[in-house]
Amino acid sequence: MDLRGALRRTAMTRPAVLAVTLPGATELRLEAEAEVRRRGWPVVDAPAAADLLVVCGDPASDDTPWLDGIERSMPEPALRIVAGESGQLADALDTARRDLIDKAATRRAAEVAEVAHVADVSDEPGGHEHGDHEGHGDGHDHTMGEVAGLPMAERGDDRDELRLDRLHVPIGPASSDWPAGLVLRLTLQGDVVQGVEVDHLPLPPSPRLPFWDEPWLRAAHGDEVSRGSAVRRRCAAHLDSAGRLLAVVGWDDVAARCRRLRDEVLSGASRESIGGDLRRTVRRVERSRPLRWSIAGLGELPADRARAAGVSGPALAADGDAHDRLLKWLHEVERGLEGLDDARPLAPDDRTGPRGRLDGPQPPSRALLDILPELLTGAEFACARIIVASLDPDLDELALAPVSGAAHA
Amino acid sequence: MPDAAPLWATVVLPVALAVAAVVAAGFDAMLSGSAERGPAGSVREAGLRALAPLREALRLLVQRPRRTTAADRLLGRLGVVLVPVAAVLAGAVLPWGFRAVSDPSVGIVWFNAMEALAWAAVWLAGWGPNSALSLVGGYRFLAQGLAYELPHMFAITTAALGAESLRVGDVVAAQDGLWFVVWMPAAFVVYLLSALAMSFWGPFEHPVSRDAAGGAAAELAGVDRLVFLGGRWLLLVVTAGFSVPLFLGGGHGPLLPGWAWTLVKTVAVLALLVAGRRALPVLRMERYMEVAWMVLVPLTLLQALFVAVVVLNR
């Protein structure tokens, strides 16, 4: 019998992690990703597969219901930890692992008594998959009615004017490879997006500047910031976005390389040590014809339309589809290699952050969010995810508007 | 040439397939590990990375299964279990050297019929949990089936045509001297693509891909998840392994005995698929369908025509 106990304990030595990032916690997310990767723990993308829920950032009270929902829909032994401050993550993960091992080893009595979980879907904005519902072709056209407490799907005309079931599916904020805090309320027919409502988690006022825009904002406030550190931040931001897009496209190998490079750039690796690896990765993406063929034409955003919508930065300069935006990011990263160790101070009037101009009337990510509905409507679910990832809005910036105004004055 | 295999082979088959699946998954985990964390510094580290699939299996065994609201448990479970069952049943006609567990006169049809069970399996597993993203995964596999199945059937029909028999043993016997891959290269390549597609793995893992939180597997936990995703590796091993008797001469080869040649060739095909996966993103059927029907179907038909003409004139 003790063999079983030993096996249970061994099983949880590397728990599977589902990481959820709250707005404003980009730095914590990067720390968590690096730490989990260093330990070799598996990272999963659905509550059903996870043992350990790692929440990056301080949850507001509004966040509790949907986080609870995710935790409830994880199979036992399940645990949630909150990584609220940087530097404490390693300890928190150690403790969590110990608790999970204890839980796994002692749960035998409960196993018999308790039946499997039933996910509660009543009140969460983004418990992103469980318990959604589909109507069965029952020959009736009515939209009301309930099955097991869940409303039946309603019907509506699809793009070929067939009356088909409509599902309302919220995506985010706990999806993997997804902008932190973003919630898209999709109306799906089959897997075609028929309607989109852009929403986000509450953005608590934070004393911290948005991580990706920090060097430029600090320079604008009069702090001394070196050009090299700004270039590093820009390169890392683009590598992060590129890694995300490549992960959504399903090219895990290159996505993992982009993320590793991102962490090396941020941790101060020299140009010589990463230059070769980085150029090889960029060439690999550039030359991949299957990738081009797979995502070309998705999320087409010509420059004039982008400008009219207030988009600046790489999404404007790319003047094209998801593939163009990916290459734009990677080329900017490659160009940035030269300036990684530039010690000259950043000019205080340089306000071009990774996602666009920080001194405009609205933060650059606001414009990226505003054009989402027109780009997503009519796309298939998979394409919609690719389009979102190819724009990669940063919701941390939304709390920024007054800051840049003040800096301007 | 084919002899009846002894009875114990029936018991050994699932075990052998499982071992092959673990080895293949371990190799895959090693390659993924070096992309994520850099090259392994030591042999020990490399070994630890290769053990990841076994650790993962143990972890899933300890997890408690869960279910979702208003789930169709019967059909969902059926879908999950069908994946490994289909793989093992298809493996029954897979010859080791020159012997298979069973070598019926319609072996190739049997193999294809068992693979077609995967259609039902993934769709049912996606349907079962009553969850939107699972269902999206299920839809994706139906589209995938429509795209790969026709070229796939023409590809294996071509091999049967070359041997003038649907018996797998006869197909192997017909390749004594000249492997089919030499004069049916298009059919071989299409077969490899469809092997990946029907085991919904690698570039064809869209039905269970990350962007839909695991698609058809999104709601599976614990043993269910292990059986489904482990069954997927079994399916990959079997379909990759079947390319050996179909196109690569089965157990034929100099010096080594038949079973060893089968092993070497199977390992080579699996290694090619697992390593080649690194070069490709996931293919979405919305784009792949056009290639499948406009390029691969005519290509395999031309290939079959060529083989038919050769066979008629021999």
Image: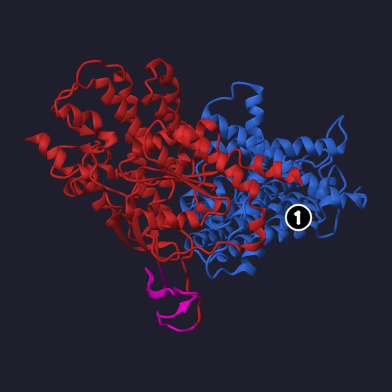
Chain colours: A red, B blue
Q: Position of residue A7 (x, y in %)?
A: 70, 42
- Residue B116 seen by the camera: no
Between B63 and B4, the one lying in front of the other is B63
Position of the C terminus of chain A, as image quadrant, is top left
Q: Determine if the magenta segment contains residue A146.
A: yes
| Magenta-drawn segment | A139-167
Helix or strand or loop: what does disc 1 sit on?
Answer: helix
Q: Position of residue A353 (x, y in %)?
A: 23, 34
Q: Is residue B80 left or right of residue A71?
A: right
Q: Amino acid at mark 1?
A: Ala
Q: Position of residue A170 (x, y in %)?
A: 38, 60
Q: Residue at x 77, y 35 (%)?
A: B264
Q: Position of residue A91 (x, y in %)?
A: 48, 33
Q: Determine if the magenta segment contains residue B151.
A: no
Q: Residue at x 85, y 51 (%)?
A: B11
Q: Residue at x 59, y 70 (%)?
A: B72
Task: Classify A235 as above or below A249.
Answer: above
Q: Is residue B91 left or right of residue A74?
A: right
Q: Give the residue number, with chain letter if any, for mark 1.
A: B90
Task: Classify A331 as above or below A51.
Answer: above
